[in-house]
C-alpha cells in the first residue's frame, strides 16, 4: 500500500457537522431501533433467563449482562453507520464526491465519517448506560468513564467497518461483514457469558476481538472494579485504533478518486 501523508484540516468537523445535521431529522427512528433492541435483550435474557441462571463472576446475571449490552450496542451503532451509512453517501447519494468539490480532502471526508461513527457509539452506548443506571445496575461512579471508552472503541469499529466499505463491490456484501465478523464478536466476546468455559482456542481468539476488551472495560467500570488490570485492555484498543485508521482512507480514496 502506498500511504501518503494525511491531508487533514479543520474541514473534518464540517463533514461531521453535515452528517449530524442530517441525523437531527431522522434521530427518532434511528435512536428507537438502537434503544429498544438492547432493552429486549435485557428484558428477555436479564430478567427472564436470568431467573434460571446462576451468578456469573460473582454477579447476578442481569448485572453481568447489562454492561455487555452497553458495549455491544455501541459497536452495532458504529458498524451500521460506517458500512451502510458511509456506502450510501459514497455510492448512491454521491455526497463524498460533492464534498470533494470543495476544499475538503478525502482524508477530511473519511475522518469526518469516522468521528461521526464514534459519536454514534458514544450516544447509543450512553443511552443504554442511563437505562442501566435507572434500573439500579450501576455500582460505581467509575461508570462515568464508560463514554470515553466508547469513543475510542467507536473509532476502532468505525475503521474496521470502513475498511470493509472500501473493499466491497456492492451494498449486499455487508451481509458477510455482519454475519461473519460482527455477529461472532457479539456472541463470543463475553457479552452473554464468561469465556472460561469455552475451548482454549476460543479463549485465545477472544483476545483479538475489540469487543472483548470493550466489554472488560465497561463491565469493570460499571461494577466499580477499576484497577491497573484494565490498562492492558485500554492500550490494546488505542494501539489497534492507531494502526487501523490509515487503511480506510487509502481504500476509500481508491474508490472515489480514480
Image (spheres, rainbow, N blue to C red):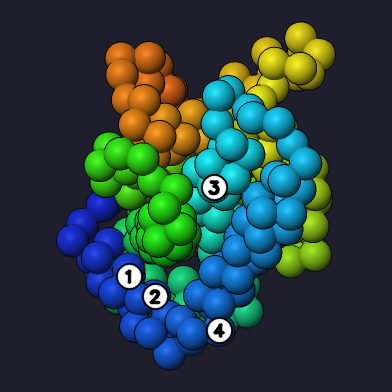
Mark 3–mark 1 Cα distance, whole angstroms, equals 33 Å
Earlier sequence position, callout 4 versus callout 2: 2
Mark 4 touches mark 2? (CB < 8 Å): no
Disc 4 designates what residue?
29
**Circle 2 crowding by C-alpha within 10 Å: few under 14, some 14–19, many from 20:** some
Report how far apart the C-alphas of labels 4 and 1 lie in the structure.
Answer: 22 Å
Location of the C terminus (image quadrant) = bottom right
Q: Residue 15, which numbered label?
A: 1
List the residue tagged with mark 3.
Answer: 66
Sooner in the amino-acid sequence: mark 4 or mark 1: 1
Image coordinates for residue 24, horizontal then vertical, percent: 38, 85
Residue at 42% from the left image edge and 30% from the top image edge: 220
Kindly state the secondary structure of the residue where label 2 is placed: helix
Which residue lies at the image location 46% right of the left edge and 82% below the top edge?
Answer: 27
Q: Is residue 129 above or below residue 19?
A: above
Return the x and y of residue 80 as percentages of the image width and height: 60, 62
Which mark is nearer the camera, 4 or 2? 4
What x and y, as percent, mark residue 11?
Answer: 23, 65
Amino acid at each position: 500500500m502506498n500511504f501518503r501523508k494525511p491531508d487533514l484540516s479543520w474541514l473534518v468537523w464540517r463533514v461531521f457537522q453535515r452528517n449530524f445535521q442530517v441525523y437531527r431529522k431522522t434521530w427518532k427512528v434511528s435512536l428507537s431501533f438502537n434503544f429498544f433492541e438492547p432493552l429486549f435483550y435485557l428484558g428477555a435474557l436479564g430478567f427472564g433467563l436470568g431467573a434460571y441462571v446462576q451468578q456469573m463472576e460473582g454477579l447476578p446475571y442481569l448485572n453481568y449482562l447489562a454492561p455487555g449490552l452497553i458495549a455491544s450496542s455501541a459497536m452495532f451503532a458504529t458498524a451500521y453507520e460506517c458500512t451502510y451509512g458511509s456506502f450510501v453517501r459514497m455510492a448512491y447519494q454521491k455526497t463524498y464526491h460533492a464534498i470533494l468539490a470543495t476544499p475538503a480532502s478525502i482524508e477530511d471526508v473519511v475522518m469526518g465519517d469516522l468521528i461521526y461513527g464514534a459519536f454514534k457509539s458514544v450516544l447509543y452506548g450512553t443511552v443504554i448506560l442511563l437505562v442501566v443506571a435507572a434500573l439500579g445496575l450501576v455500582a460505581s461512579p467509575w461508570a462515568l468513564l464508560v463514554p470515553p471508552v466508547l469513543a475510542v472503541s467507536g473509532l476502532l469499529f468505525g475503521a474496521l467497518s470502513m475498511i470493509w466499505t472500501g473493499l466491497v463491490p456492492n451494498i449486499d456484501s455487508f451481509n458477510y461483514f455482519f454475519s461473519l465478523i460482527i455477529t461472532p464478536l457479539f456472541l463470543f466476546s463475553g457479552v452473554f457469558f464468561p469465556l472460561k468455559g469455552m475451548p482454549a482456542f476460543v479463549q485465545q481468539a477472544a483476545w483479538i476481538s475489540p469487543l472483548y476488551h470493550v466489554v472488560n472495560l465497561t463491565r469493570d467500570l460499571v461494577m466499580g472494579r477499576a484497577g491497573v488490570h484494565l490498562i492492558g485492555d485500554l492500550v490494546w484498543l488505542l494501539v489497534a485504533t492507531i494502526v487501523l485508521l490509515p487503511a480506510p482512507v487509502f481504500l476509500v480514496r481508491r474508490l472515489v478518486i480514480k
